[in-house]
Amino acid sequence: MDAGSVAFLSVTPFPDTRRGDLVEVLHGRAIADPYRWLEDPDSDETADWVKRQNEFTAAYLDSLPDRSWFLETMQQVMKQPRAGVPFKRAGHYFVSRNDGTQNQDVIYVASSLPELLAGGRVLVDPNTFSEDGTSSLSSLTVSADGQLVAYGVSEAGSDWTRFRLLRLATGDAVDDALIQTKFSQAEWLPDNRSYVYTHFDHKGDADGTQTAALAGPKLRVHRIGDLQDQGQVILESPENDQLIFWAEVTEDDRYLVVSIVEGTENKNRLWAYPIVSGERSELGSPIKIIDEPIAEFSLAGSDGSTLYLRTDLGAEAGRLVAVDLEAFADSAETGWHEVVAPSEHTLSDARAAGYGFILIYLADAQPLIVKVGLDGGSSGIVEVPGGAVVGLNAKRGDSEAFVGLSSVTSATRSYLIDTGSSTVTSLAELVQPSHEPFLAPEIVMERHVATSKDGTPVPYFLITLVDVDRSRPQPTLLYGYGGFKIPVLADYRPGWPCWLAAGGLLAIANLRGGGEFGTAWYEAGRLASKQNVFDDFVAVAEDLKQTGITTTQQLALHGRSNGGLLVGGVLTQRPDLAAVALPAVGVLDLLRFHLFTIGAAWISDYGNPDDPEQFAQALAYSPLHNVRPGTSYPATLVLTGDHDDRVVPLHSHKFTATLQYAQAGEQPILTRIEVSTGHGLGKPTALIAAEWADLLAFAAYQTGLRPRNSEGLDA
């Protein structure tokens, strides 16, 4: 089959889905919701619908001619041994590893770096948590005295986790209550027998399929031996259940620094609780450093009573400031000074390291690592290769810092930075090959710029094989996100090397709403400006076609979560734009998202549907409500997990049913509903390989891509 041609397998009628007659009047508008019944994940009718849809999709995917090639290649990709970024605590070194055959990464510990590089000792093996490999490790923290370890266990990909304790020296379990939480790790206090965490009340068993909206959290202290409900409540906000608390103990154990943020807003309050150390750690009254959400503040390090903060206050691209809490206690107007002034690049991270700081900048959405002294004076750029920094572990006074980077075709590569000399040493020995390696394809990465509807330049990465035929358009996968100030970089995703190895082109868009280019770039892609994100994505797609890189028939659109909303929104606004749409775990019902689990937190980006003006804004782009019967929609594969308790699967279910009902063309509308997985947390290796294989095989077939080395096929 020629690369520019497209053929469709015959599609039998879609599985039957009952249409109800529910219509609600919201802010004076009649809103039909015929598939409201699919919001109940535990009903027999929903279970039957899921079963029939999965069977229908499986039959279609089984018939794809190159599905086996994609599955075999993805299995090779996922079988590559890998390791995370090391960190130090209490004189010990820790790292995660996977030999390529394990569903979950294993945590190793050693008393020295050479010992860790040589292998170390298994501390926690999540592969023992469940027989099917779907339970995973969500967090791991070590007490300051190096005696105890607290780790979180997630079952079936749920955001709900339970803390367990063990003794570092022996690995023996510690008898304690299984503390249940979400979006939190155990933050140890200096008494080494208590920790701070975020507590959410819940009814019944929290098993990952509940859809009820979360109640407001409490910041609590858990003392070993107590039951969960006996923990002291440090902070709660009954008057605003959208506030979320993030706690961090400074490296010298003097303060508990708490960030107070409303949902996923990128402005926060910042309080510091003095810690009274002793046999039993106690917390003093908070010093309210920032008590109005005027900007973003995050802890970069501390030195006695001085806290170093990364902030965008007065600096759209970010800067580093210091506040002396002793001086601040006398007058909130004193005690502040600037350490590192704003740069032309976006400051995405800052950590105290040795006797200075390591700063991570984004220079045109590409990482730039800089080391500075305590006075902010630069001591040079740290030269390490990669498309994104995926980990930075460092602390004040330590001569060793660890940084991990990934690229489009390679997972984490870790490096040791000498914080005194800035010397960089590769830690390739962390990854211990156990079999023939997967040879990642040799690629070329280019920077391109599209022009959005309002004239805004929108950059994107274009990644191709070194020897790809650029004289004619080629099948292309376009990926985007555009939200929550999260930067989208040229980093590693397991499917990228597989798609590229098949001969496809990959485009990664830097859309407004993301964090690549500072606060104004983010603000231009949320709330009343959310439409800019869809326009930006369309602009990149059109640029790819106008420049001869691809064609409509060869273009596939992909995004996850907020990126799933992106693809769904573009799919409904421009059904003629591409051949394929691949929305995964997407927010697709913008009128009811705030009613389920943590959904109300996203009001910061999407607005509040209970507000008439913001309701109208959301309705204008809500994918579910902009599907038009009688329209020819592109081939679509909607992906979700039955235990996704962040973006609950009802979004994908209702959107799939609505698209299938409306489809006037011959292209398939399918959904792939993974069992015992969630939003993505801790997904087993085998399931990652299978999901990517299906997604890529579907995209390849619909865009005319045939794998280069598939037996008996032309290049």
Image (spheres, rainbow, N blue to C red):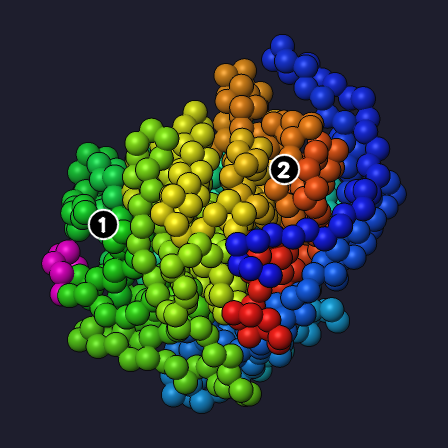
Q: Which amino acid does label 1 sit on?
A: His
Q: On the image, which quarter does residue 153 sit in?
A: bottom right
Q: Position of residue 453 (x, y in %)?
A: 37, 30
Secondary structure beneath disc 2? loop
Residue 155 visible in the picture: no
Question: Residue 459 or 312: which is nearer the viewer?
Answer: 459
Q: Which mark is residue 57?
A: none
Query: Could you tell me what secondary structure mostly forms the magenta stretch?
Result: loop
Residue pointed to by mark 1: 345
Q: Where is residue 523 in the image (x, y as percent from the top left)?
A: 36, 33
Q: In whole angstroms, how far apart are the C-alphas of marks 1 and 2?
A: 40 Å
The boundaries of the magenta stretch are 374-379
Mark nearest the camera among 1 and 2 is 2
Reply above or below: 293 against 500.
above
Residue pointed to by mark 2: 633
Residue at horizontal 15 percent and vertical 65 percent from the top: 380
Query: Looking at the rendering, in which quadrant would you find the N terminus?
Result: bottom right
Residue at horizontal 59 percent and vertical 71 percent from the top: 713
Secondary structure beneath disc 1? loop
Q: Which amino acid does label 2 sit on?
A: Tyr
Residue at horizontal 27 percent and vertical 74 percent from the top: 417
Q: On the image, which quarter does residue 163 sit in?
A: bottom right
Instruction: Tell whether 11 sits left or right of 146.
Output: right
- Specify which label sits upstream in the sequence, 1 or 2: 1
Q: Position of residue 47 (x, y in %)?
A: 83, 46
